[in-house]
Image (tube, rainbow, N blue to C red):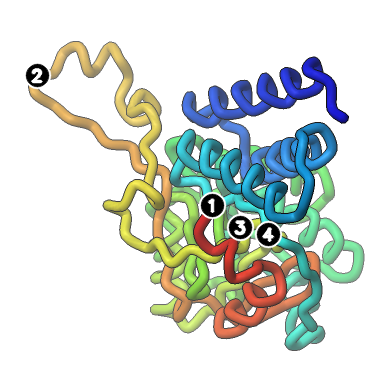
Amino acid sequence: MPSESEKKEVNERIESFMTDLRQSAELGSLTVATRTVDIMRRLIAQMKWANTKELIDIIRTEGKKLISADPSDATKVSHGGEGGDAQDSQEVAAASAQIGEGGEDQEPDYMQVVPNLKNAARKRKFQVIVAEAAPYFKGQEMVSSLADADIETTLISDASIFAMMSRVNKVIIGTHTIMANGGLKALCGILNVALAAKQFAVPVFVCASVYKLSPQFVTSVDQEGFQKYNSPHHILSYKEMAELDDVEVLNPVFDYVPPDLIKLFISNIGGNAPTYVYRLLSELYHPADHEL
């Protein structure tokens, strides 16, 4: 029987997590997923329940509270299931070995790409072209990390992506979420990269763990469940704003990238085409968990 102190501890953790989500703290997808799982484990171990139905009701109730704190985050808890075969292991290996333009995310997402490149650099030499990813400039951090691994790297401005795409043979990016239709909820600016790649017939590969897979079909930037906005001070300083009248500055976080712009997803369980996402969903999510 769980004690009152244990129940209180769980509730305090939930409230603390919800506060972080509401304040748009830069938690990152991995942190959100890890803290969500930790809370669910504590709910199972420390809350009072007599049967499976009561446990599911508890998880759904607390899950809805977490979602209400940040509707734009697609991290959810499934009934379980694992698996998924690599669709083409040779193509996955080739995709991990060469790169064109690197992407980033609040996590930051470039950390999903960097390990693949460092591993590939042990087997062959290649050049990496990285966009600076304004207004957060995480691309500069990626360049520094790759340079430390003795990988030949070039930093370019976001405005130069289209001009440089003709020199690229593969594009590797990260993403915030993989939507149910195989599209991406990625950092704002990634759509431009994918469109430029399509223009030059350059394949786009996405490095993302399976916890980023969502059963949601949210694609519109106007929906609360998809878009969020950061402070505009990254784009226009407070001092500059004080000198302007009647100006509204928006700093959207995400782009929607349609699945037809993606060649392959590379995850911890292998590589899959966007058309295979529906199969992964059936393996990872119970149908009742698509909407809490």
Alpha-carbon distance for marks 2 and 1? 37 Å
Alpha-carbon distance for marks 2 and 4? 48 Å
Decide if residue 166 is in sight here. Answer: no
How many neighbours does mark 1 have within 10 angstroms: few (below 14), some (14-19), or many (20 or more)?
Answer: many
Q: Amino acid at mark 3?
A: Gly
Q: Amino acid at mark 2?
A: Asp
Q: Amino acid at mark 4?
A: Ser
Alpha-carbon distance for marks 3 and 2? 38 Å
Mark whose residue sits in front, 4 or 3: 4
Identify residue for label 4. Answer: 78
Q: Any mark on residue 174, and which? A: 3
Alpha-carbon distance for marks 3 and 1? 16 Å
Of callouts 4 and 3, the N-terminal one: 4
Mark whose residue sits in front, 2 or 4: 4
Alpha-carbon distance for marks 4 and 1? 12 Å
* SS label for mark 3: loop
Identify residue for label 1. Answer: 74
Mark whose residue sits in front, 3 or 1: 1
- Residue at coordinates 13% horizontally, 27% vertically from top-left? 247
- Which quarter of the picture shows residue 63? top right
Of callouts 2 and 4, the N-terminal one: 4
Q: Residue 50 location, x and y as percent?
A: 78, 45
| Rendered view: 29 above or below 4 | below
